Image (cartoon, helix red, strand yellow):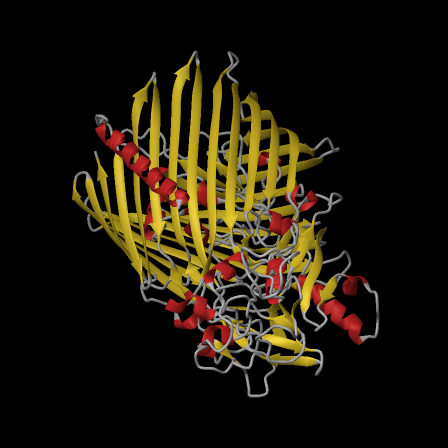
Amino acid sequence: MHRRLALKGSAASAGLIAACLLAQPARAQTSQPASLDEVVVTGSRIAGGDRLAPVDVIDRQTFAAAGVSDASQLVRLLTANSGSEAQVDQLNQPQSSGTAQFNLRNLGLGSTLVLIDGQRWTNSAVVATDGSAFVDINSLVPMIALERIEAVKDGASAVYGSDAVAGVVNFITRKGVTRPEISAKYAVADGSEESVIEAIGGLSLLGGDLTLAASHFHRSALGSDERAFTQAETYGRAPWTAVTSYGQPGSYFRPGTGGFAPDPDCDDPAFAEAYRNSPTDSFCRLDYSDFFDLVPEETRTQLFADYRRPLAGAELWLQGAWSSTETVARQSPSLPILAQSLTVPASHPDNPFGEAVLFRGRLLGAEAGASVADFVYETWRVAGGLSGDFSTGWTWDVSATASRQHVAYDKPDAIGSALQNALNGLGGPGCDPTTGTPGAGACRYFNPFGSAYLGTGTANDADLVDSLIGSVGLRGAAGLITLDASTGGQALAWAGGSIDVALGAQYRRSTFRHDWSDRVNAGDLLTAGYSPDFDGDQEALAAFAEARVHLGDRIEAQLAARHESYDGDDGKLSPKVAVRWDANDALALRASWSQGFRAPSVYALTGAQASQPSVFDRGAFVFVNTLTSGDPDLKPEESESLTLGALWRPLPGLELGLDAWRFDYTNLVVKESAQAIIDQAAADDAAGLTGTPAQARVTRSGAGALTFVQLYFTNASSIETQGLDLSARYSRDLLGGVARASATWTHVDRYDIRLTPGAAATSGLGSTNLNTLGRSLPQDRGEFALSWADAANSLTALVHYTSGYKNDRSGVTDPDIASQTTMDLLYTLAVGADLDLSLGVVNLTDEDPPLAQFALGYDPVVADPRGRVVSVGLTKRF
């Protein structure tokens, strides 16, 4: 409760800042957008000149037309991006809800470097289920403070360092805002609504310009019970849907018969979500498709400040940012018992089997309603720098940043020791299991059978149940400190050209800490299992040089190199060469080649991660407890990229672009696949082998149920991917206004994965890649925009296209996932000189996600489950 009050207080502070902005006197001039060459040209340390690397730019108008209320929705606007985890998925991404990240070229969540005005930001305090560390773009700056994003789509390690192997996404903020502005938007979908209020303004302070921005965002939950396509019953409770043999009422392994038997009350109509596949089915199953969020309840408050002023012949800049996010995600009433085998003794007063039996199921059933997992992220960043000119005309720049994210993650889970004691009659908050008598005094039996709910057996009171539930209780933090120094200027000039140079050095220190509850440290939670606490750090030193060569008016080249070392090792050199030739005034050709590397994260080197992936075992989908351990001997990931492109302007106002690209990415740091280990162990069993490495890492209960799989972070061999990016832009005067049209298209021609050197390639192209190293990768993605605007009206239409692809999930009956095309519309009317009214629709035709045989009927990595979203907004300038 105190956390929610804190967030409400943050919203109040945002309102106060807005009020302060409104109180400032308006200046004569209006706010101007930053020019393309202000501060930094993304892809180069040298400002000015033409862009030599392929760069996509997405501006504020596109944000608005796409109905973007928070940064997680930006990932769908870049066709070169695929495989981001930007939507909640408590089944497959349970530890990172509320975060989002870019994934250029589907080379990994941590392979795209995210910058704010050319400066780094800390990684998130949580990691993805596969162990990937990433920058949480939800925690950056208020959307109203964002001028545009620029995405460099080829390797940029030579310019920016490790983590830029797939490219860079630079968030460029608004500066020099002279007129206060406040904006409010309300949006509604069937079953969910969201609201955002934002403010930005500026004032003169101590001889400089201060820009302040604040936002408060809230979204209500959209439950899986609000959509028919998520319901297991829609598909006849097929095995691939959200159904499980770990039910409540449960199932019991009977040693006397050597097999399982369902709870005798499983078929009672009082248990609406319990069922058996047939009268002879030995498992009492649970349909849990009603209990998850497609969109979680989320509240986010953000503050941002930017200050710039001349100082003794130099320019001083300072930035500060703060963000607080709370995400409340629903999940099943209680989680399946995975980590331990629990016994119901023969002496249990409600045991109908007359012998001790092993319990397969969960603490609570559907009748208890959904439980919730709570995520709270608090992020701050301070940065500053000085820049100036030497008397020789060269420039100098020094800067420093410090950023940190904290997470508090609480998720209920049954306590193994307490539940086993309660099954033995030694449960309850007042019972001492070492001295108590089963079922006497304060010591009580927990009744796991359906008779507890039906009233035909011992009832379980609330105090007893509460005493059996603990929390994962994760408290974590990630931090980053950077120090940069650089200088640059013209090194050489002659009649036919010149050479500009930038030189610099960088120091970084990153930290990561996870502190789990004592129950998790002891392995006493029945689903979360065991996770040790972890605290680590990593230091990096880098030196870089870049040269921009101008040969006449038609040829420009970039030569860059960066040497970077981690924790005192020998380091790696990352080179880059790029060239652009303007063949004539209409046609430009460009090419770039680079090598890069990415050091293993602190987490992958020495951390450990517990997770419960869905796997296919012995004919059924089940969740299994896994622990992935770090490896201090992991090698750096290495990449080589090549891009060839052309820009053609055949008519005034029309620009066409084509880029062919290729990435060879080796030594990828990945988490081993639990499914692959289980399959190998099963193959070894079938071959009559014993004691194999795979068998040693798979643990089963006495009844044969999976209870644990040991995994490791490892260097996989390689990903080789290539494709084409196409773009078109056109603008012209029309009907008293300006009409604009644009299109971007990414076609992936190859995505080959080799798990070990010399192994046969496995194609991940057009696949969900659940059994490989990648993530969902449709072969084609397209974004189309058409707009018209005059002094009082603006109309923008966006069309989003994703090609069909295949589902490689084990055990599915139909692997096909259809293509999807959706349209967004935004109309803005200038009601007065300083007041705009906007009406928007996302997914105009209310398309459901294409059917994918995932537990909830769609692929959450690719598809948006909300359907049509209608919004109204007001923007007032003062």
The answer, for residue 48, to whether it is visible in the render is no
- The relative height of residue 434 versus residue 22 in the rendered view (above or below) is below
Q: Looking at the image, which residue is at 43% across and 61% down?
A: 293
358 sits to left or right of 214 = right
- The relative height of residue 438 versus residue 399 in the rendered view (above or below) is below
Q: Give whichever of 828, 708 is nearer the camera.
A: 708
Q: Give whichever of 89, 85 is nearer the camera.
A: 89
Count of number-bearing discs: 0
Residue 443's image quarter?
bottom right
The answer, for residue 735, to whether it is visible in the render is yes
Point out the image quarter for the C terminus: top left
137 sits to left or right of 731 = right
Q: Looking at the image, which residue is at 32% across and 19% down?
A: 205
- Relative image position of residue 772 (x, y in whole percent): 64, 61
Q: Give whichever of 740, 290 is nearer the camera.
A: 290
- Relative image position of residue 676 (x, y in whole percent): 70, 65
Q: Give whichever of 857, 207 is nearer the camera.
A: 857
Residue 545's image quarter?
top right
671 sits to left or right of 244 = right
- Relative image position of residue 491 (x, y in whole percent): 58, 21
Q: Residue furthest bottom?
A: 279
Q: Residue furthest front?
A: 441
- Relative image position of residue 599 (x, y in whole percent): 67, 41
